[in-house]
């Protein structure tokens, strides 16, 4: 149904609680809850976790050439490339 397994269990438990307690007016909110949980499920949580971990790293990718870093390289790995 487009929802993560854990969210589907939550959705079913809410639905059955509404049915058992006979509060049928709240059945109006079940499609809203379903589409909200479906929207949350469409987000890629793994890439968000990777991005958060990447942002906490001390070292980050910089697209510009830094001459002091090229000088630190070992011989044969572009050490004297930009003299």
Image (cartoon, helix red, strand yellow):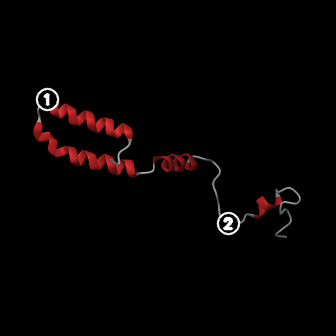
Disc with the residue nearer the chain's start (2 vs 1): 1
- Name the residue nearer the viewer: 38 or 52: 38
Q: In which quadrant of the rendered image does the C terminus lie?
A: bottom right
Check disc 2: other Cα within 10 Å, few if <14, some if 14-19, many if 20+: few
Q: 17 above or below 47? A: above
Q: Residue at x 23, y 48 (%)?
A: 32
Give x and y (percent) for residue 50. Answer: 54, 48
Seen as rendered, the residue at the extreme front is 1
Q: Residue shown at 30%/36% (left/top)?
A: 10
Circle 1 Cα neighbour tier, 10 Å, few/some/many (<14 / 14–19 / ≥20): few
- For the residue pair 47 and 18, the one nearer the viewer reads as 18
Q: Residue at x 16, y 29 (%)?
A: 20
Instruction: Please say if the residues under marks 2 and 1 sit with CB atoms less than 8 Å apart.
Output: no
Q: Which residue is mark 1?
A: 21
Tell me: residue 20, above or below residue 61.
above
Which residue ends up furthest to the bottom in the rendered image?
A: 83
Which quarter of the picture shows residue 72?
bottom right
- Disc 2 marks which residue? 64
Q: Is residue 31 left or right of residue 4?
A: left
The residue that appears at 83% across and 68% down in the rendered structure is 81
Tag on residue 82?
A: none
**Nearer mark to the viewer, of 2 and 1:** 1
Q: CA distance from mark 2 to mark 1?
A: 63 Å
Q: Is residue 1 left or right of residue 80?
A: left
* Residue 25 relative to residue 77: left or right: left
Query: Residue furthest toward the right?
Result: 75
Callout 2: SS = loop
Q: Position of residue 76 (x, y in %)?
A: 88, 60
Is 38 left or right of 66, judged from the image as shown? left
Q: Position of residue 61 (x, y in %)?
A: 64, 57
């Amino acid at each position: 149904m487009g929802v993560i397994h854990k969210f589907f269990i939550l959705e079913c438990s809410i639905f059955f609680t509404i049915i058992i307690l006979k509060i049928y007016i709240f059945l109006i909110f079940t499609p809203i809850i379903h589409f909200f949980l479906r929207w949350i499920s469409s987000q890629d949580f793994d890439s968000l976790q990777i991005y958060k971990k990447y942002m906490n790293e001390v070292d980050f990718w910089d697209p510009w050439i830094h001459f002091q870093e090229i000088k630190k390289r070992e011989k044969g790995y572009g050490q004297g490339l930009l003299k």
